[in-house]
């Protein structure tokens, strides 16, 4: 199958890289949250598969360097070059250009001992594929013999950063619900990114507020799974 060379994508591409570069200071609290969460995840083995890492804008170099071999799967033709700029010490990466549906299963077959990290990609899958619900439903079974983790969009809403900048990360033993948002004083309409089937109903999750724009708040869900 011919690789997809689009520089503009519904879920990222040039627009995303430009935004992430310009908003680096505003994104710093979110990056630190992801770094702290990943530091607490210690899957066995020395191989890691990164799914949708893009340029690694929100990934910590020090944590990545703990793995001997890393394979990155991404559709973005700029990802490899920009990732190298953001993580110059992470040189031993194998890059595969393609969709996780076609590239992840054969890579898991080659690396049966690898851990898998989905890098803020699963909540955007609906923008790229019409069959996103079926894919998300099937993922846990595909990964049932692997240590894996994901951080991804859970809810997105139009919220002023000036009014709610004090929002802090939180943990729950279940998925965040609309009443949780109300208790935080967050009213209005919220987009559900459809990632509710990824983890068991009663499973610990972390939630990180991410001001993707000054007037738009993403709640990022993060959780780990073991075989």
Image (spheres, grey):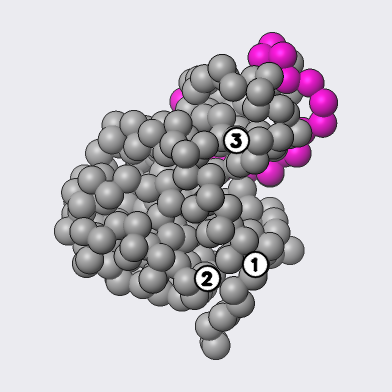
* Picture quadrant where residue 126 is located: bottom right
Q: Residue at x 25, y 45 (%)?
A: 63
- Specify start and end residues of the magenta stretch as a single range: 183-204
Mark 2 lies on a secondary structure that is: loop
Mark 3 lies on a secondary structure that is: strand
- Residue 184 appears in view: yes
Query: Which of label 2 and label 3 is nearer to you?
Result: 3
Q: Earlier in the sequence, mark 2 or mark 3?
A: 2
Q: Between residue 88 and residue 150, name the one nearer to us.
A: 88
Q: Is residue 128 magenta?
A: no
Q: Which residue is mark 3?
A: 211
Side of 214 where 205 appears, left or right: left
Counting from the top left corner in percent of width and height, residue 224 is at 40, 38
* Picture quadrant where residue 41 is located: top left
Tell me the distance, in whole angstroms, between the alpha carbons under discs 1 and 2: 9 Å
Mark 1 lies on a secondary structure that is: strand
């Amino acid at each position: 199958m011919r690789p997809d060379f689009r520089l503009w994508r519904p879920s990222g591409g040039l627009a995303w890289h430009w935004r992430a570069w310009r908003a680096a200071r505003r994104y710093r609290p979110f990056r630190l949250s992801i770094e702290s969460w990943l530091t607490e995840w210690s899957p066995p083995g020395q191989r890691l598969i990164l799914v949708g890492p893009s340029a690694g804008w929100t990934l910590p170099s020090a944590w990545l360097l703990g793995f001997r071999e890393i394979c990155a799967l991404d559709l973005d033709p700029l990802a490899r070059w920009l990732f190298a700029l953001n993580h110059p010490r992470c040189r031993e990466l194998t890059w595969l250009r393609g969709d996780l549906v076609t590239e992840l299963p054969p890579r898991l077959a080659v690396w049966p001992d690898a851990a898998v990290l989905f890098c803020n990609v699963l909540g955007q899958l609906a923008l790229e594929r019409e069959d996103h619900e079926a894919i998300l439903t099937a993922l846990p079974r595909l990964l049932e013999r692997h240590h894996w983790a994901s951080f991804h969009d859970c809810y997105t809403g139009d919220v002023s950063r000036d009014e709610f900048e004090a929002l802090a990360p939180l943990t729950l033993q279940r998925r965040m619900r609309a009443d949780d948002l109300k208790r935080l004083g967050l009213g209005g309409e919220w987009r559900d990114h459809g990632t509710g089937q990824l983890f068991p109903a009663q499973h610990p999750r972390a939630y990180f507020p991410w001001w993707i724009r000054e007037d738009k708040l993403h709640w990022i869900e993060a959780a780990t799974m073991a075989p």
